[in-house]
């Protein structure tokens, strides 16, 4: 994964806006058909959006990059402790959730803000903090996969920390997403076992990506160690170029499974309204 060396992170800011808008302020449960619906807009949202700081997003992404890799066990623990401390500093009820994987104990970070009306109903906002690359043991900075997602959760937590919500807001920072989704699978299994009433889950992944300015990037290809990964890099560059020709600049994809189609459309509509970016909706079985 390439490092994010510039502050051109428009997508990150835009996703932050969507996160703020969708974080319980708009989502409600229709008691008749149990589908996610939108309630009327709240003018208070505009004030919240203005509080998002690009400098904080960049600072947190650079901090996560500084680990060089977040693939190894010890590096994931370092990142988890840092994230937990950041959430505690924001006065959230944060804890490290430990699970067994590959003969070791690994960390997730779970932080909660209790709902005022019905705390048993939960909105989950999540991102993974581990990374992958052609040489993940030594170099996998993961700026946009997924340092940007983590930065968004942290900044959104900061903006939302003094707001009272009807339902419980849960921030989940998962480890080992790149190795079989071990962290999120463990959380989901425990949530099911405990009978948690999760109304919606929004996953933030691969955000703020800036494609090469030219039609080809020798640096992106040269950074890959094996022939196989060099070929994959060439393919991805061309697919990004094709996507740019097809959709234009400043595009974001909102994706989800068919069962979550209502939520995908709700987020997409809000994104169009507040971000100014073009939105591509993907509702497929292989999403999520």
Image (cartoon, rainbow, N blue to C red):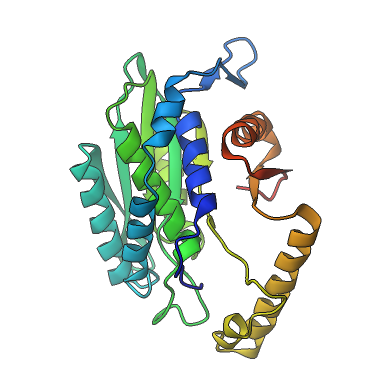
Residue 149 at what x, y percent from top left?
45, 52
Q: Is residue 12 left or right of residue 255?
A: left
* Nearer to us in this view, 227 or 8: 8
Residue 203 seen by the camera: no
Where is residue 139, by image quadrant? Answer: bottom left
Res. 155 visible in picture: yes
What residue is rendered at 36% in x and 73% in y? Answer: 72
Image side of residue 177 versus residue 164, left or right: right
Q: Is residue 223 above or below residue 58?
A: below
The outermost residue toward the right is 246
Tell me residue 36's x, y (percent).
Answer: 59, 23
Q: Residue at x 39, y 22 (%)?
A: 167
Residue 121: where, in percent of width, then height? Answer: 42, 22
Image spot of residue 263 (x, y percent): 61, 31
Residue 161, compared with residue 210, is above or below; it is: above
Residue at coordinates 74% horizontally, 72% vertically from top-left? Answer: 238
Left or right? Give the position of 186 relative to 161. right
| Residue 62 figure quarter | bottom left
């Amino acid at each position: 994964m390439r490092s994010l060396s510039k502050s051109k992170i428009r997508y990150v800011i835009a996703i932050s806006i969507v996160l703020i808008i969708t974080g319980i302020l708009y989502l409600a449960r229709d008691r008749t058909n149990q589908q996610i619906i939108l309630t009327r807009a709240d003018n208070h949202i505009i004030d919240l959006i203005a509080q998002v700081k690009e400098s904080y997003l960049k600072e947190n992404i650079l901090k996560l990059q500084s680990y060089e890799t977040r693939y190894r066990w010890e590096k994931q623990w370092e990142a988890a402790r840092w994230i937990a401390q950041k959430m505690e500093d924001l006065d959230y009820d944060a804890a490290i959730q430990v699970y067994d994987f590959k003969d070791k104990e690994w960390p997730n970070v779970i932080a909660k803000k209790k709902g005022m009306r019905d705390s048993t109903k939960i909105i989950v906002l999540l991102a993974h903090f581990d990374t992958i690359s052609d040489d993940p043991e030594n170099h996998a900075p993961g700026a946009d996969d997924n340092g940007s997602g983590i930065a968004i959760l942290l900044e959104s937590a900061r903006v939302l920390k003094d707001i009272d919500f009807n339902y419980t807001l849960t921030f989940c920072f998962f480890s080992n997403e790149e190795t079989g989704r071990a962290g999120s699978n463990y959380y989901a299994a425990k949530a099911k076992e405990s009978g948690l009433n999760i109304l919606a889950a929004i996953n933030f992944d691969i955000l703020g990506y800036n494609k090469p300015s030219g039609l080809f990037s020798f640096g992106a290809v040269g950074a890959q160690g094996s022939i196989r990964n060099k070929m994959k890099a060439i393919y991805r560059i061309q697919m990004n170029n094709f996507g740019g020709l097809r959709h234009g600049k400043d595009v974001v994809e909102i994706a989800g499974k068919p069962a979550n189609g209502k939520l995908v459309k709700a987020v997409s509509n809000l994104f169009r309204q507040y971000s100014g970016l073009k939105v591509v909706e993907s509702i497929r079985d292989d999403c999520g």
